[in-house]
Amino acid sequence: MHKHRGLVLRHVPYQDHRYMLSLWTRDSGPLSFSVFASHRTPGILRSGQLLPLQELELVTTGASSLSVQRVREMIPATPFLGDLKGMQRLAYGLMAEWLASVLAEGQNESAYYDEFSAQLQESYKRTDTLAVVAECLAGLSRHLGFAPDPQNYRPGCLLDGNSGAWMDPGEAVSANTWRMGPDSCAVYVQSLHRLVGTETGYADFLNDLATYFQVHLTGFRRPRYLPLLLSA
C-alpha cells in the first residue's frame, strides 16, 4: 500500500460510481488513480467532493494497470471546497485545467507544490478572485522557467513573447514576434510580487498570459474555463 496527498486536476467517469482521477501529488507529480465514489454508499467519498484543486489523501492497494493505481481509501483534506460559489469555483476549475495541461507526468518539485498549496490556503479568505488566479498562474510561469525578471521591469514597457525580455514600446522587432502590452505587463509584475491591487486589468492579463504560455509551451491549449471565468 502507498499513501499519496495531492490536488485534484480532473476526474472522468468511466464505470458505475468509478472515476479516473488525475491528482497532482506532492512527492511524485501528476498521477492517475481509479477511484470509487458514490452519493449513496456510507463511508465512501462522495463524487461531488472530487472538485478541482480539492486536496485529497489516498491509500492505494498496490495494484495498477497502465500506470493507473487503484485506490483503497480516500479522505478529503480540509477545507472542503464544496462551499465555493460562482467565480471562485470557476477560478479553481481554470487553475486545475491550466496545471493539468503543463505539468507532465513525473514532473514535480515538492517546494513548488507547497508554494502553490499555500497560495490556495490564502485564497480561501480572499474575494479578489481574478487577482488570486493571476498570482497563482504567474507563479506557475516562474516555476516553468519563462517568467520575466520583475526586477528589470520599467513602467510602460512591453514584454517580448519569445525572449521574455522587457522592451521599450518603440523598439523594433520581427514581424512574427508577439508582445504583451504595457497594461498586462504591469499586472504581470504585480502578480509575480503578489502585491495587493484591484481587479482592474486582470481579465486582459489572463488572456495575454494564456498566449504567453502558448508561445513557450508546445501543445498548450487555452483553457475552456478561461472565457467562462472572465464572463462571470
Image (tube, rainbow, N blue to C red):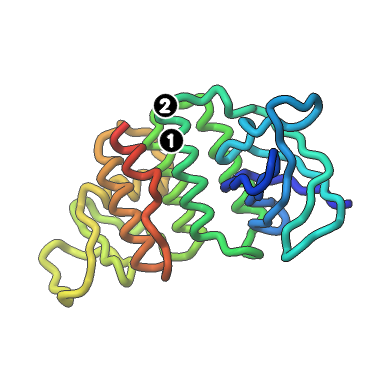
Picture coordinates of residue 32 (x, y %)? 68, 55
Tag 1 residue = 90
Q: Which residue sits at x=39%, y=38%?
A: 195
Q: Give 26 or 67, whichever is nearer the viewer.
A: 67
Mark identifier at residue 157:
none
Relative to 101, is 39 on the left or the right?
Answer: right
* Badge 2 density bin: few <14, some 14–19, many ≥20, Cα 10 Å: few
Number of numbered discs: 2
Check contact, mark 2 vs mark 1: CB within 8 A.
yes
Q: Name above or below for residue 198 compared with residue 32.
A: above
Picture coordinates of residue 58 (x, y %)? 77, 43
Looking at the rendering, in which quadrant would you find the C terminus?
Answer: top left
Given the image, on which type of amino acid does mark 2 rest? Gly
Q: Give 42 or 213, whichever is nearer the viewer.
A: 42
Q: Which residue sits at x=22%, y=59%?
A: 158
Picture coordinates of residue 136 (x, y %)? 47, 45
Q: Which residue sits at x=42%, y=67%?
A: 219
Tag 2 residue = 86
Q: Name above or below for residue 126 compared with residue 202.
A: above
Circle 1 SS class: helix
Q: Name above or below for residue 180 compared with residue 12.
A: below
Given the image, on which type of amino acid does mark 1 rest? Leu
Q: Name above or below for residue 91 compared with residue 224.
A: above
